[in-house]
Structures are given as C-alpha cells and as structure tokens.
Image (cartoon, rainbow, N blue to C red):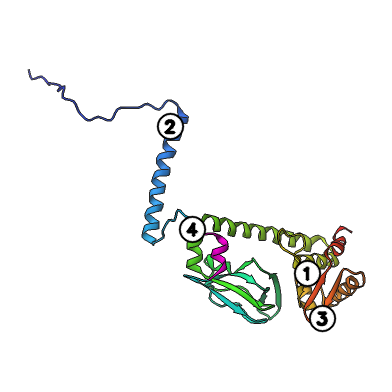
C-alpha cells in the first residue's frame, strides 16, 4: 500500500500573527484601505499631471503678483471684469479698489448682489461645473485685480494647504454673511438694514481692516441692496446726516461715523 511521505524541508512561510481583538482588526483593515486609497489617489494625480508639492507658497506672495496662469488686471471705474453670460474661466482677487456684483433678470430688472473690496475673491463659480457667469462684475473705483485662470486656481487649491485654508475660510465667512443678510432682510426694518449695509461697506468691526470712506454709490443701488424704495433710502440718509451719523465727502463718497450709526442697530 502506497504511503504519502511528508517532507520536512523548510519553506518560506509567512508566520501567522493573530489579531488580538476586534479593535486591532478594524485598525489593521483601515490601515490597509488607507494605503490602497492613497495609492489610487497618487496614480490619478500622476495620470492627470498634478504634482504633489511638500513645500507651501505664502498666500500673500501668491496673490500679490502675476505669474503662470495669473496676471494683474487694471480697471477704471465702471469698467467690467466680466459680464453676465460670459464664459466662466477665472477667479479674481481684489488687490485694490471696489467691485460691484449685479444680476439682470429676463425682464431687464437689475439687482445688486454685493459690493466687494480689497482682499475679496469673486468669479469662483468657475470652479464648479457652471459654464457661464451668472452675474456681472463692474469696478466702482479704479481697481487692481489678480486674474487667476481656472486651472491654475484648482492646482493651487490642491497642492497648497495654506492657500486652500485661506480660500475656504473666506468662503465660509461669506456664507455666514449671506445668512446674516437673509436674517436682516426678514426681521429688521429698512432703516436698520440701511444702517447695517453702510457699516459693512465702511468695514466697521472688521479685524485688521481700517474703516474707509464708502465710494460714491447711488441711492438706487442702496435701495436694491436692502430691498426698499429710493425715496425711503433718501429719507433715512437725510436723517442720518442731520443726526451726525454720516457726512457726504464732496466728489468722493460717504464718510460714516460708525460708533454713532451703530447705535441704530441697538434700538
């Protein structure tokens, strides 16, 4: 009868290491998954030609001057950075000046979405799948803008953690501002809404930002921003001036006395 001989020859076997408990098992599986995921992400980045940089560029330096995929644009008052329905292809950063964002309805009614100043971004809708600009951006004063092409902006957000954190913080702060605008519109009187928008335009209460003279702005625009009529805005502006809350600077704009005007919000 034939017998099977078991060889005693040594083999290169991987020693068995039992997992002590369920927690260790989960930790081990997570580590394997994360390594695999990291490998897939790197393969994708290599295929897409995206380089992973270990060093970080100073955001201030990145936003201070032109370079690959970005250039400085100079606009005079009333000139447009882009118009509604233009191709959405770049993000803009305001180095100097003020920009007004507006939208026009199908029946021709214009509304002001906001007035932006130094340190603000606009045009970021191009980073989504939006092919066209939904609003127009027009210079209210002489402006110095940094135009960052869509691809360059996306690469900077992917590879520069410090710059990405700054941009995300800006978007979150602006989202909070939009929520506050909605609450203000729903619950406050038109007089309080006007006082609040004037304080915001003067940079009242902003850290490391000096209060400024509000550039020349029409009462129609202020009425659009707070959702009331021009006659109501005119009434409140005259009242604020008589009470010493603001002054009109000849040919330049509105000087807001913030500490006095802010009292309107507390009434």
Of badges 4 and 3, nearer the viewer stands: 3
In this rendering, would 253 be left or right of 42?
right
Q: Position of residue 231 (x, y in %)?
A: 86, 77
Q: CA distance from mark 1 to mark 2?
A: 59 Å
* Percent position of residue 242, x then y: 92, 72
* Residue with the mark numbered 2: 25
Indicate which disc, 3 or 1, sits on the residue closer to the N terminus: 1
**Which of marks 4 and 2 precedes in the sequence?**
2
User: Which span of residues is magenta-colored?
Assistant: 57-65
Query: From mark 4 to mark 3, how far is it between C-alphas?
Result: 47 Å
Gap between marks 3 and 2 measured at Cα: 74 Å
Q: Specify few, some or many for label 2: CA neighbours under 10 Å numbering under 14, 14-19, or 20 or more.
A: few
Quarter the C terminus occupies: bottom right
Question: Residue drawn at (43%, 32%), measured in percent from left and top?
Answer: 25
The residue where tag 3 is placed is: 250
Q: Is residue 61 magenta?
A: yes
- In front: label 3 or label 2: 3
Give left or right: position of 164 versus 24.
right
Instruction: Judge from the rendering whether residue 140 lies leftward or rightward of residue 14; answer left or right.
Output: right
**Quadrant location of the N terminus?**
top left
Which residue in the structure is indicated by mark 1? 226
């Amino acid at each position: 009868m034939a017998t099977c001989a078991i060889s005693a020859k040594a083999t290169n076997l991987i020693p068995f290491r039992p997992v002590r408990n369920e927690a260790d098992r989960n930790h081990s599986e997570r580590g394997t998954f994360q390594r695999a995921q990291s490998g897939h992400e790197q393969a994708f980045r290599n295929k897409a030609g995206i380089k992973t940089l270990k060093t970080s560029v100073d955001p201030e330096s990145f936003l201070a001057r032109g370079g690959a995929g970005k250039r400085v644009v100079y606009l005079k008052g009333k000139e447009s950075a882009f118009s509604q329905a233009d191709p959405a292809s770049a993000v803009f950063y305001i180095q100097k000046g003020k920009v007004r964002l507006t939208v026009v309805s199908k029946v021709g009614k214009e509304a002001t979405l906001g007035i932006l100043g130094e340190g603000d971004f606009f045009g970021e809708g191009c980073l989504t799948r939006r092919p066209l600009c939904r609003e127009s951006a027009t210079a209210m004063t002489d402006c110095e803008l940094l135009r960052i092409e869509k691809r360059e902006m996306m690469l900077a957000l992917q590879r520069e953690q410090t710059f990405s954190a700054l941009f995300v913080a800006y978007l979150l702060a602006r989202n909070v501002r939009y929520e506050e605008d909605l609450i203000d519109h729903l619950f406050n009187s038109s007089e309080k809404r006007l006082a609040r928008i004037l304080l915001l335009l003067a940079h009242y209460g902003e850290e490391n930002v000096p209060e400024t003279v509000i550039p020349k702005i029409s009462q129609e625009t202020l009425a659009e921003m707070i959702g009331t009529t021009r006659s109501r805005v005119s009434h409140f502006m005259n009242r604020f001036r008589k009470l010493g809350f603001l002054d009109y600077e000849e040919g330049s704009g509105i000087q807001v006395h913030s500490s006095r005007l802010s009292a309107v919000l507390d009434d």
